[in-house]
Amino acid sequence: MMLSKKILLIALLMTTPFVASAEAEFLTTYTDVESYVEAKIRLGKQDVLESDLIRTHYIVERDLETMKVIVRPVQNQYTAQNDAL
């Protein structure tokens, strides 16, 4: 009985900093690259270079309270400026 109380106390002390540290955690970012076929259709030409491809950056965020994962695109600053005009 005494041993289980000590183990429980140690487990609580170990997990407390992780629970109280943040409400949301950013897991990773990754890039979704447009395919060559999509770029050919968009540009209307057959000779598509790798630099012509549109790259979209995403942030994967996890809410530590609800454990819900949110994936949202990160808007390019130039796109944001153009949208504001």
Image (tube, grey):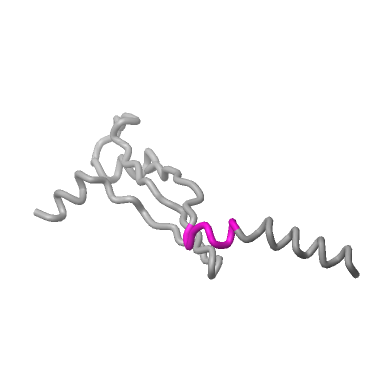
In this rendering, would 84 be left or right of 24? left
Q: Does the magenta stretch include residue 38?
A: no
**Residue 40: percent from left, percent from top:** 30, 40
Residue 84: x, y in percent?
13, 55
Magenta stretch containing residue 23, yes or no? yes
Residue 61 point in image, percent of width and height: 46, 56
Relative to residue 55, is residue 70 drawn left or right?
A: right
Left or right: residue 39 compared with residue 65:
left
In this rendering, is residue 39 above or below 27? above
Give the vertical position of 43 relative to 12 (above or below).
above
Q: Nearer the viewer, residue 41 or 85?
A: 85
Say if 43 sits above or below 58 in the image.
above
The residue positioned farthest toward the front in the image shown? 2
Q: Residue furthest left?
A: 85
Magenta highlight range:
17-24
Nearer-the-camera pick, 39 or 22: 22
Q: Say which quarter of the image contains residue 44.
A: top left
Q: Which residue is drawn at 25% across and 36% down?
A: 45
Q: Does 37 appear above or below 69?
A: above
From the viewer's side, name the closer residue of 14 and 77: 14
Residue drawn at (35%, 41%) of the image: 55
Indicate left or right for 17 with 14 as reference.
left
